Structure formats: structure tokens, C-alpha cells
Amino acid sequence: MEAKEDEKKEMGFMDHLEELRRRLFFALIGILVGGVAIFVSKDWVFDRLIFGPRNPDFITFRAWCALSHFTGAGDRLCVTDIKYELINTTMLGNFSAHILVSAIGGFILAFPLIFGQFWRFIRPGLHGSEASAVRGVTWAASGLFFCGVAFGYFVIAPLSLQFLGHYEIGDVQARIALMSYLKTVASITLAAGIIFQVPVIIHFLAKMRLVTPAGLRKFRKHTLVATLIVAAIITPPDLTSQVLVAMPVLGLYEIGILQAKRILRRQNAEDAAQSDTAT
């Protein structure tokens, strides 16, 4: 009898692994399809997207210049010249850069599919109320991820590249390796996309009754410190860049608190209704 129960448990575990393998396969297919699309669009992707922040006519730089004129600062915020130079020092450098961009771009394009597969894998293990607690989570997570990627690309990356690329020591000229440039842009955009998942995480935890609005408010200062630490890691070491990263994250945290408050109010109403029914 015990042997049969062990066999059932083992079969269940193997089925679980098979389901995980299947979900990972679909996710990898999505990344591959997105990566191929990026790969065959090499000229447009590199000229318009990857090297866009190196162009003085980049939309972010034009916005800075317009803001500078609007505030009466003249051309102080205008970017008229990109001084640093990108170089490749290895035979496989350009090809490796092409593969790296295709892989990261494929992941970004396939994020809704990747998250959807992750959600389909863990959803059967949730109770009915827990599963309904995060209904529509794939769309919410995907939307926030793309907003974070856009914020990282259009706001943080240009600031970081301008600061790091034009940081001078004596008469040493900045000649930056292509892979270093790509890794900087990729790490910033992906980190911003992940950081923007804060409301989704808070919503899930609140529905699971693991966090409360009071608890979130209590740890607000800790969140501020953690956000500044993350901002210092993914941005150049200047106060402006760190504040620009911290502000939207803290804003998303406050939205999460309001969301948790609304969820708690609804849960209290449901508990009261069940109590009245039981009596």
C-alpha cells in the first residue's frame, strides 16, 4: 500500500517536471522567435535603437534641450556632441554583440509569453481564491515591464551614457568597447523593467494576506533605502540619476499601498459577510 502511494507521489513529481519542461520549452521558443526577428533587423535595431542614445538628435536629448530653453537655462542641458567612441578589439566582437542584442531583444519581446508560461505553471498549485486574486496578472506585469524598459531606455540610459562616456581623467580619451556599451544599456533597461513589477508583487501578496497597508507603510523608509541602493547600482554615481530612478519606484510603491488598502477593505467585507452567513 505504501509502495503504491510512493509510486503515485513519484509519478506526480515526474509529471510536475514534465510540465515545467514544457513551459520552459514554450518560453524558449518565444525568445527564439523574438531573437530571430531582432537578428534579421540588424541595421534598424543597431542604428535606431542601440546607437540612438549616441545621437545628439535622440528624442531624450531634444526633450532636455527644450526643457532647458523653457526654464531659461539656455543650452546648458542641450547635447550637441557625443565625444566618446565605440571600438571593437576582437574578431568575434561585432558578431557577439549582434547575438547578445538579439537574445536580450528576444527576451523583451517575448516577456508576455514568458510570464504567461510561468503563471500557467504555478496556477494549478493555487487555491481558487488565490488564483482569482491575480487574474489578469500577465497583462499587468507585461505592461509594467514594457513601461520600465521604456523608462530605462529613454531616461536612465541616456543619463548614464552621457555621464560615464564623458567622464574625463587628465587627457585620457574615452574609447569604449562595444560590448561594454551594450551591457550597460541592457542592464539598465532590464533592471528598470523588473523594478516596475512592484505593484504586481504587492497586489499578489496582499491578496494572499501576506502584507497589509499598515505593514507596507511601516517599511516605507526601508523601501526608500533599498530603492536608492538599487538606483546607485544601475545608474551613474550622481544624485540626479538616482532620484530619477527612485521617484517612479516609490510612486509605484505608494500605488501598491493604495491597492493593498482596497484589497483589505474588500477582504474584510467578505469575511463579515461569511460571518453573518455562518451565524
Image (cartoon, grey):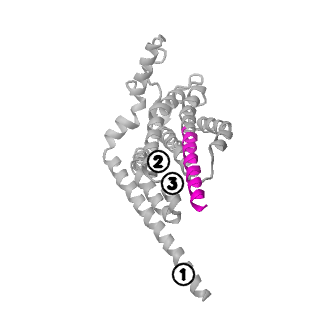
Q: Look at the numbered disc 2 and give the secondary structure of its residue.
A: helix
Most common SS among magenta residues: helix
Q: Are marks 3 and 1 in contact (CB under 8 Å)?
A: no
Mark 3 sits on what residue?
133
Pick the residue in front: 260 or 184. Answer: 260
The region drawn magenta spans: 255-279
Mark 1 sits on what residue?
8
The quarter in which the C terminus is drawn is bottom right
Pick the residue in front: 173 or 221. Answer: 221
Q: Nearer the viewer, mark 2 or mark 3?
A: 3
Residue at position x 38%, y 59% in the image:
29
**x and y percentages locating residue 133 in the rendered image:** 51, 54
Three-letter amino acid code of the residue under disc 3: Ala
**Residue 265 counted in the magenta span:** yes
Which badge, 1 or 2, is on the more N-terminal residue?
Answer: 1
Residue at position x 55%, y 33% in the image:
245
Three-letter amino acid code of the residue under disc 2: Ala
Snapshot quadrant of residue 226: top right
**x and y percentages locating residue 140 in the rendered image:** 45, 46
Mark 2 sits on what residue?
141
**x and y percentages locating residue 16 in the rendered image:** 50, 71
Q: Is residue 151 shown above or below 126?
A: above
**Residue 25 counted in the magenta span:** no
Three-letter amino acid code of the residue under disc 1: Lys
Seen as rendered, the residue at the extreme bottom is 1
**x and y percentages locating residue 200 in the rendered image:** 52, 47
Q: Is residue 121 at all visible to an observer of this figure?
A: yes
Which badge, 3 or 1, is on the more N-terminal residue?
Answer: 1
